[in-house]
Every structure is written in C-alpha cells, then in structure tokens.
Image (cartoon, rainbow, N blue to C red):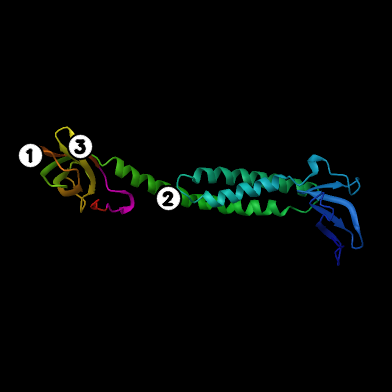
C-alpha cells in the first residue's frame, strides 16, 4: 500500500496487523487502533500483534447479530430470535463505541453499522409480532372450530367413484367454515378418504352442507359401503382452498 496523499488522518493499516494506523501527513506512525482501542505498535513488520489487539472485535460480532436481526425480525415465530439478536447487537455496539471514545480512536465501521441495523430491527419486530399473532389466530381457528355436529346424509359408490354429502351444524357463538375429512368404508376396510371444505361459513345455530368425491378401490359389495365423518376442522388458514381429488 502506498502512502496516502493529503492531510494527516487514520487510514487502514498498510501492514494488516491492526484496523487503523495514523498517517501524520508525511509518513506512517506507530499509533494504531483496533475497534476503537488505541495502541502503540512496538513490533517490527514481521511481528504479529498480541491476540487482544487483533481485529476480532465486538464490533464485528455486533454487526453479524444486527444483520441476522434485520433478516428475521419481521418473520412470524422467528421474531423472538430477531429481538434477542438486536438487543445483544446494540449492547455490543454501545460497548465498542464507548471503548473507542475512551481511547480517542475512530469508531469502527462495523460498530456504526451494528447500531444502525439493530435500531432498524427493533421496529421491524413489531411487524413480526403482528404477523405471529395473525398466523396463530388462523392456525387456532383451524385446529379448534368450536362446538359442532356433523352427519352424512348420502353415501354412494359406483365402481371406483365414491360420493358422500352431509351437513355440519355450527353450535358455537360465531360464524365459521369447516374442513371435513370423510372416510369411505367397505365393512372394516377403508376404501379411501378425502378432505373437503364447505362452500360457505355457517352462522351460529345454522348448518352448512358439504360434499366429497374420491376415487377408491372397487368395493367387494356395494351394499356394504358406508361413509363416515372422520374429522372436522375449521377453515384452512388464509383462505386456502382444497382441490378435489383427480382420477388416478
């Protein structure tokens, strides 16, 4: 590295042993700094700096944590990791900033970046918390549809095509939709099962109809075929629609 031109100042250490070295306007001096801590370089060019003077600084660790925080702080569930990473990054950044001021040395760029990114990550965590609450509400509505009654009203099998229809009665205090799992049985043998969703939400005390069609193994005796409601859940999260089964 050639000597810089212009006024005196702190520049990257041309020897690579420290983060910065002071140039007095004419030549390089022995005044050096790493992560805001100033030292006097008493070794020759071939002498490596002591371990505590190397550029493995809290500023770098703070920057990595702050970057992680910005990436995950807005994500549902992962927001907790983002908040913790942001708080630790800011704490390390403040520590490094105080050390540089105490030593009257320039502040590391990693330290500044860590403080900025950590400050950005904390507001982003508000988005992550909101999304987490929304996702949990959707999942809970699916897993816990509330009190209900479900019954099959019609069940037929023609060859390999099984059809069932029925009703779900909403016994809760709020309107909701349902996702119904229907099993097609020939005696004790399960011919097939399908998951279907009702076309519309059912108001409290009202019923919603559902229908299911599935391609199953041929029944040994069509008269013995029965249909049963195996499970009833709430609507799929975020309005995802269930596609009907296609012929194999």
Q: Of callouts 3 and 1, which one flags the residue occurring earlier in the amino acid sequence?
A: 3
Q: Say the numbered circle drawn on residue 131.
A: 2
Mark 1 burial class by Cα count in 10 Å: few <14, some 14-19, many 20+: few
Circle 3 packing at 10 Å, graded few (<14), some (14-19), many (20+), is some
Q: Quadrant of the N terminus?
A: bottom right
Residue shown at 85% from the left, 64% from the top: 4
* Residue located 51% across and 53% down the image: 124
Whole-Å distance between the Cαs marked 2 and 1? Answer: 50 Å
Q: Do labels 2 and 1 touch, CB within 8 Å?
A: no
Please tell me how crowded label 2 is: few (under 14), some (14-19), or many (20+) other residues with Cα within 10 Å.
Answer: some
Residue 10 position, x and y percent, is 82, 57
> Label 2's element?
helix
Give the magenta part as a residue range.
Answer: 233-242
Q: Quadrant of residue 173?
A: top left
State the residue position of label 3: 190
Q: Is residue 179 visible?
A: no
Relative placement, left or right, of 66 versus 237 is: right
Q: Position of residue 164 (x, y in %)?
A: 14, 46
Residue 43 appears in which quarter of the rendering? top right
Determine the residue located farthest toward the bottom in the rendered image. 6
Mark 2 → mark 3, Cα distance in angstroms:
40 Å
Secondary element under disc 3, as helix, strand or loop, is strand
Give the label, 2 or 1, closer to the camera: 1
* Residue 197 drawn above or below residue 146: below
Residue lying at 42% horizontally and 50% vertically, measured from the top left: 131
Farthest-out residue, top: 188
Position of residue 47 in the picture relative to residue 127 (left or right): right
Report the residue marked by disc 1.
Answer: 223
- Secondary structure beneath dot 1 equals helix
């Amino acid at each position: 590295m050639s000597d810089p031109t212009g006024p005196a100042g702190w520049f990257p250490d041309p020897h690579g042993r420290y983060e910065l070295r002071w140039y007095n306007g004419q030549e390089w001096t022995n005044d050096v700094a790493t992560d805001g801590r100033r030292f006097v370089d008493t070794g020759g060019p071939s002498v490596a700096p002591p371990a505590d003077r190397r550029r493995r600084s809290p500023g770098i660790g703070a920057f990595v944590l702050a970057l992680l925080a910005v990436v995950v702080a807005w994500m549902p569930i992962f927001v907790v990791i983002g908040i913790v990473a942001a708080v630790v990054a800011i704490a390390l950044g403040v520590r490094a900033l105080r050390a540089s001021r105490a030593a009257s040395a320039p502040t590391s760029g990693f330290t500044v970046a860590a403080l900025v990114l950590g400050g950005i990550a904390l507001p982003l965590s508000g988005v992550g918390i909101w999304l987490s609450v929304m996702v949990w509400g959707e999942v809970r509505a699916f897993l816990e549809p509330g009190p209900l009654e479900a019954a099959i009203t019609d069940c037929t099998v023609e060859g390999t095509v099984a059809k069932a229809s029925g009703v779900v009665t909403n016994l809760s205090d709020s309107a909701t939709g349902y996702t119904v799992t229907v099993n097609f049985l020939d005696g004790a043998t399960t011919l097939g099962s399908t998951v279907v969703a009702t076309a519309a939400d059912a108001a409290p005390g009202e019923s919603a109809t559902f229908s299911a069609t599935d391609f199953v193994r041929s029944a040994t005796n069509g008269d013995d075929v029965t249909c049963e409601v195996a499970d009833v859940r709430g609507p799929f999260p975020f309005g995802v629609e269930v596609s009907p089964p296609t012929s194999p």
